[in-house]
Image (cartoon, rainbow, N blue to C red):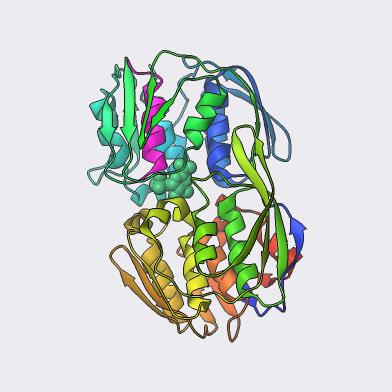
Amino acid sequence: MKTMVSSLSAGLSGNFRVPGDKSISHRSVMLGSLAEGVTEVNGFLEAQDALATLKAFQSMGVKIERLGEGRLRIHGVGLYGLKKPKSDLYVGNSGTSMRLLSGILAGQVFDSVLTGDSSLTKRPMRRVLDPLAQMGAKVGSTDRGTSPLQIYGDGQLSGIRYEMPMGSAQVKSCLLLAGLYAEGETTVVEPAVTRDHTERMLRGFGYAVKTQGNAVSLKGGGRLKGMSIDVPSDISSVAFFLVAASMTPNSDITLEHVGINPTRTGIIDILLLMGADIQLLNRREVGGENVADIRVRSCALNGINVPEELVALAIDEFPVLFVAAAYAKGKTVVTGAEELRVKESDRIQTMADGLQALGVSAQATSDGMIIEGGDVQGGEVESFDDHRIAMAFAVAGLQSRSAIKINNCENVGTSFPSFVELALFCGFKISTQ
Ligand code: S3P
């Protein structure tokens, strides 16, 4: 799919389920591979990013059976059972694969190289390489601290206490995974709470992980035991529909079986502050993760100052939140979100440029954006090869004065290959080429 053209919709309706959570899918393959015994996964996200992790473990000798849509059977090899891959591990667009894998690879006895696509090779990797080196890992990168990453297998890792300079679940997870191989205790202290799927899943696999305030610790030398994992729908994919149904008159949709881990629900809290009509129904717990069906109906959104403590809890949802702000009454101010500049694209700049091209008053700041809600015109925007930018502008097209054409949409397949199908199902008007 090269381009999407999104135009006026008279309302969204229906009950449906979006694909599995990307973060949990990555981790299910990683921990399932490193566990002893079989791990069965249901609801695995069959999208390029999570499949990149799956292929990486297959090329390190792990037998992973694909039993049908979203169903995997992983024959774990134990923490010390991975084999040296025959070639470089290519993980495409996936920052999660690269950063989490680097922690696991630092604990191996073989050398390896991690590479990615043109977007991933621009993203900062020192944030994981520096603390890994402090643990004793032997690692290399380009002079700019970007991939390809070389990870040499002769590092003897020792546990450290690391105060992370930024809120990043990828950095935290990388260090905890390296900590599985380290002598003694590894402690990661985060400046803001970030998604805790790694900690939860490690516990599910029978590994002791201690959380005390913002510090997470584990000791090396334990074992993981295979288990069953039910991956809920990805709230980051659901987010497009939460905003879409809120801003489109005559809408009433229900998203089923959505992961509502409290470290991921910032999008719901922010939309509620903007006046959204969102209800969490049938709350339940599935395999250590909180799940609910989410009903959302149209409403008038108001601009707000987004509380900074919610930023890390909604970090992947800002592209579509900026769209919500463009349709809201009044001003929305986002601060403390400088991490958006180092995502699959610089999401502050790419969204500000796109919104301005649609006639919205959107001013990029160093750590966020100031948006004056109002009329959104149609026009042509670039996705900058970023899946979430492409889908956010597809949502913008639901109520714009004329259609919005979005260029370079191939990367929608990295996280949400069925986006257009589900969008059409509930009432979007999208054509693709
Ligand atoms: C992720 C963490 C976040 C998020 C990414 C997935 C994870 O990245 O943006 O999409 O699965 O741990 P950062 O750790 O860079 O914030």
Residue 363 location, x and y as percent? 34, 76
User: In the image, is residue 383 part of the stretch drawn in magenta?
Assistant: no
Q: Quadrant of residue 106?
A: top left
Q: Quadrant of residue 361?
A: bottom left
Confirm whether residue 140 shows in the render. no
Q: Is residue 352 above or below residue 79?
A: below
Q: Is residue 11 above or below residue 343?
A: below
- Residue located 45% across and 51% down the image: 313
Rendered location of residue 305, percent (x, y): 39, 68
Residue stretch rendered in magenta on the structure: 167-183
Q: For the N terminus, give its image quadrant.
A: bottom right
Q: Is residue 317 left or right of residue 151?
A: right
The foreground one among 39 and 246 is 246
Q: What x and y, as percent, mark residue 227? A: 63, 23
Residues 396 and 251: in front is 251
Question: In the image, residue 309 lies at what x, y percent?
Answer: 38, 54
Report the residue at 49% width, 58% height from top.
317
Q: Mostly what secondary structure, the magenta segment?
A: helix
